[in-house]
Structure formats: C-alpha cells, structure tokens
Image (cartoon, grey):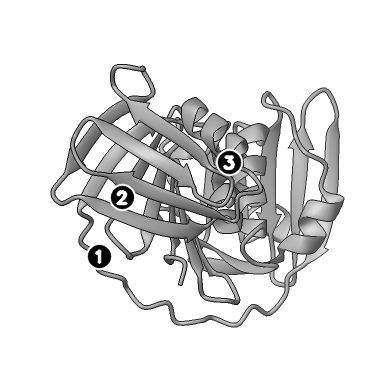
C-alpha cells in the first residue's frame, strides 16, 4: 500500500486545468469511474441520453507524482464533488489519494485544504468502439471557437459546414447567426475537406466543451454530413480529451 494506506497517491500541477476537465465531465454525467493504470488516468462517460461520449486520458507523465500500486477504479459522485470542492486556482496543486472506500482531494497553495468523499459503485457500461470516417478534419484556435459558441448561445441548433479547404462555418439557422473560420482571418489553423459536408448538432451539447477552451490553444474538429462530430482537445501537459456528439435528428 502507498502513503498512509492509500492505494493511489497522485499530484497534479494545475488546479485550473483539473477543474475544467471535471467541469466538462460533470456536464455529461453525474457519476464516473476514474481508472488509474500504470500509464495514467482514464475516464470514459456516456450521457444518459446516449448523445454524447467523453473520453479523458491523463498520462502518468502529466502528474508531478504518480504512485499507483495496481490498476484501481474510483467511483466518483461528480454532482457532489463539483458542489463541494472549491475551484482551485491555476497555481494550486491538486492531490488525489484513494483507498478502499474513500478518496480525498487536497488543494495545496499557501494552505492545504482537504476534502474527503466516499467511493461509490458506478455501473460499468459497455461503450462500443466507434469507427468513424470523417470527411472534414480541421483545427481552429480555442479562443475563436469559444467566442463563436458564446455568440451562438440560445440558438438551439449549431450547424457545422465546410465545402473546401478554406473556410469552416458554424451556422445557427434559428437565430440567423453565422461564424466563419478562415486562415485569412487568423482563426483557422488547418482544414482538409474530402467531401462537402454539413451536419446539425444540439447546441446544448456542443457548448459543454466551453470549459476546455480555456485551457488549450486549439480545438480539432472532425465531422461528416449527418454523422457524429468529434472535438479533440490536446492540453499542454499531454492530456487528451475527446468528445463525440451525435447529430441532431
């Protein structure tokens, strides 16, 4: 066993990044399994309506300390956690320690604050591996993507459209809104279009990624006509968050 009988003792350098990841996951599900393996932390969650799927991978190298005796899953009540755990600052370190029945979060700054929770049973839902062929693949600056989503708030539907390698559009037909990303404007990093594509998504699901736009420089966007969209966030410490959302019927 590790420190003081804990099976897991990990220390993460940026409280702000960790908080934004938790915020995003908690917008999808109320409960999740945090699985600590030899190579890092993995979290996969499918929302109850089976519209959105989020996968998180935090490699062991992203942690300042990563002491895991053996692969262990911790059942986390995200609703309770987000309600009681204060948002750490960027410079705060976050320590997670877990034993058989309990886990603790320590927020270390000038002072050390400790919050203890009971592990819960989280049913393991079999999430099938999804193989998708995306006709549009591009990257935009996260700040521009965040601004676009905020501008289109309240639209109900967001349409992603691309017909060539020059411009990626986000449309909000219900409010007459339109945002264009292009290399010329400085908002588009790259874009590959194999086939002209257009697909609609529920706005309430797309804006769930807003917290991640605050802690990364770019967002990878992949979609095809009337197919799920995949948004990928590669964070500065090597963390990867992939988000899939089904098209709107």
Compared with 72, 186 (above or below) is: above
Name the residue tied to disc 2.
Answer: 222
Q: CA distance from mark 3 to mark 2?
A: 19 Å
- The structure residue drawn at horizontal position 19% and vertical position 34%, both measured from the top left corner, is 165
Give whichever of discs 1 and 3 has the lower sequence position: 1
For the residue labelled by badge 1, is the local secondary structure a helix, a strand or a loop?
A: loop
| In this picture, residue 184 sits left or right of residue 114 | left
Q: Nearer the viewer, residue 110 or 44?
A: 44
**Percent x, y of residue 194:** 13, 48
Closer to the N terminus: mark 2 or mark 1? 1
Taking 5 as reference, is 166 above or below it?
Answer: above
Left or right placement of residue 131 versus residue 212 in this view = left
Q: Is residue 12 visible?
A: no
Q: Which residue is mark 3?
A: 152
Disc on the earlier residue, 3 or 2: 3
Give x and y (percent) for residue 176. Answer: 53, 42
Along the line of sight, the residue nearer the viewer: 106 or 34: 34
The answer to whether marks 3 and 2 mark residues whose Cβ atoms lie closer than 8 Å is: no
- Asked whether the residues under the numbered discs 2 and 1 touch, taking CB atoms below 8 Å apart as contact, a structural biologist would say yes
**In x, y percent, where is residue 137?**
25, 45
Q: Quadrant location of residue 179? A: top left
| Front residue of 55 and 135 | 135
Q: Is residue 70 left or right of residue 181?
A: right
How far apart are the two marked residues, 2 and 1, measured between alpha carbons? 10 Å
Label 2 secondary element: strand
Residue to which mark 1 is pinned: 132
Q: Secondary structure at mark 3?
A: loop
């Amino acid at each position: 066993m590790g420190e003081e009988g804990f099976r897991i003792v990990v220390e993460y350098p940026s409280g702000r990044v960790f908080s934004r990841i938790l915020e995003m996951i908690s917008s999808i599900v109320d409960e999740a399994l945090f699985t600590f393996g030899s190579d890092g932390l993995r979290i996969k969650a499918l929302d109850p309506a089976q519209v959105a799927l989020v996968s998180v991978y935090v490699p062991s190298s992203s942690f300042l300390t990563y002491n895991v005796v053996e692969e262990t899953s911790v059942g986390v009540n995200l609703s309770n956690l987000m309600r009681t755990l204060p948002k750490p600052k960027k410079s705060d370190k976050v320590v997670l320690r877990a034993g058989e029945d309990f886990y603790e979060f320590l927020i270390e700054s000038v002072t050390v604050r400790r919050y203890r929770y009971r592990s819960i049973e989280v049913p393991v839902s079999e999430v099938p591996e999804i193989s998708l062929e995306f006709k549009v693949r591009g990257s935009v600056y996260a700040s521009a993507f965040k601004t676009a989503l905020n501008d289109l708030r309240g639209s109900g539907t967001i349409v992603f459209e691309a017909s060539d390698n020059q411009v990626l559009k986000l449309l909000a037909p219900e409010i007459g809104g339109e945002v264009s990303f292009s290399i010329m404007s400085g908002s588009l990093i790259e874009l590959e279009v194999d086939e002209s594509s257009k697909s609609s998504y529920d706005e309430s699901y797309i804006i769930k990624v807003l917290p991640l736009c605050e802690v990364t420089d770019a967002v990878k966007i992949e979609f095809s006509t009337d197919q799920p969209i995949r948004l990928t966030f590669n964070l500065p410490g090597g963390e990867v968050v992939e988000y899939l959302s089904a098209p709107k019927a």
